[in-house]
Amino acid sequence: VVIVLDKVCAALARWKEEGKPLYPVSVNLSRKRLYDPNLIDHLVGIIDGYGVDHALIDFELTESATYDNTDHMLSVLEELRSRGFKISMDDFGTGYSSLSLLTEMPLDTLKIDKSFVDMLGTSNEHEEDVIVIRLIIALARELGFVCLAEGAEHKEQVDRLRELGCDVIQGYYYSKPITIEDFDEKYLKK
């Protein structure tokens, strides 16, 4: 997380200095890192060192990771959120989290795992996947979270997710992963 966060903040600081538009960036936060007693000070030190607005950083946890000390995890997330960072649950629907944990976590975004999106809009679409997606979207909405679907590769998937009411859609349909330099050239060139 430290190396990635440093690169993200360096790019955001440069774009800010150049007067380019700034967009929030997600950075994975591993379960192992949550137990670092200096984690928050370390993360905030990197971000503040570059003068990056905390609202531009979205810390992402993977739902499939298990958390031995839920109270500690919640306190770390609450502290990060109180400092203005966004918090997302990645790969939702594939892990073993208790649904009750969702009511305790200070989340901003629930990310539907790609495995539910893969067959959407195809002749192999399963009604069960559609039901799960619809329920995750409704759950996110009821809990006040943004619902984001991962892994949309085709227009039919994007159309189906929009039809189901998904707030945000990401995937290869929009862009494959690109370098910072390519992003700068393609999306931020004045």
Image: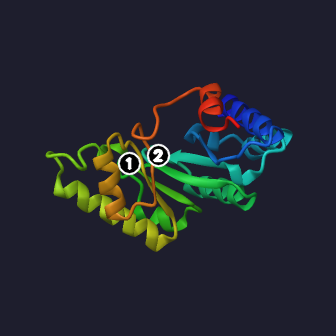
Q: Which residue is at the front of the view, 127 or 95?
A: 127
In the figure, residue 190 lies in which quadrant?
Answer: top right
Q: Quadrant of the N terminus?
A: top right
Q: In the image, what residue occupies the spot 41% across and 46% down?
A: 150
Q: Residue at x 24, y 58 (%)?
A: 130
Which amino acid, by three-letter code, is at mark 2? Thr
Q: Quadrant of residue 105?
A: bottom right
- Residue 95 numbered tag: 1
Residue at point 56% right, 46% down? Answer: 60
Residue kind at label 1, given as amino acid type: Gly
The answer for how far apart the CA atoms under marks 1 and 2 are is: 8 Å
In this rendering, the count of numbered labels is: 2
Q: Where residue 66 is drawn, which disc sits there?
A: 2
On the image, the x and y values in percent for residue 103 come to 50, 68
Instruction: Characterize the local packing of mark 1: few (<14), some (14-19) or many (20 or more) Cα atoms within 10 angstroms.
Output: some
In this view, 177 is above or below 94: above
| Camera-nearest residue between 65 and 107 | 107
Image location of residue 152, percent across then percent down: 36, 44
N-terminal of the two: label 1 or label 2? 2
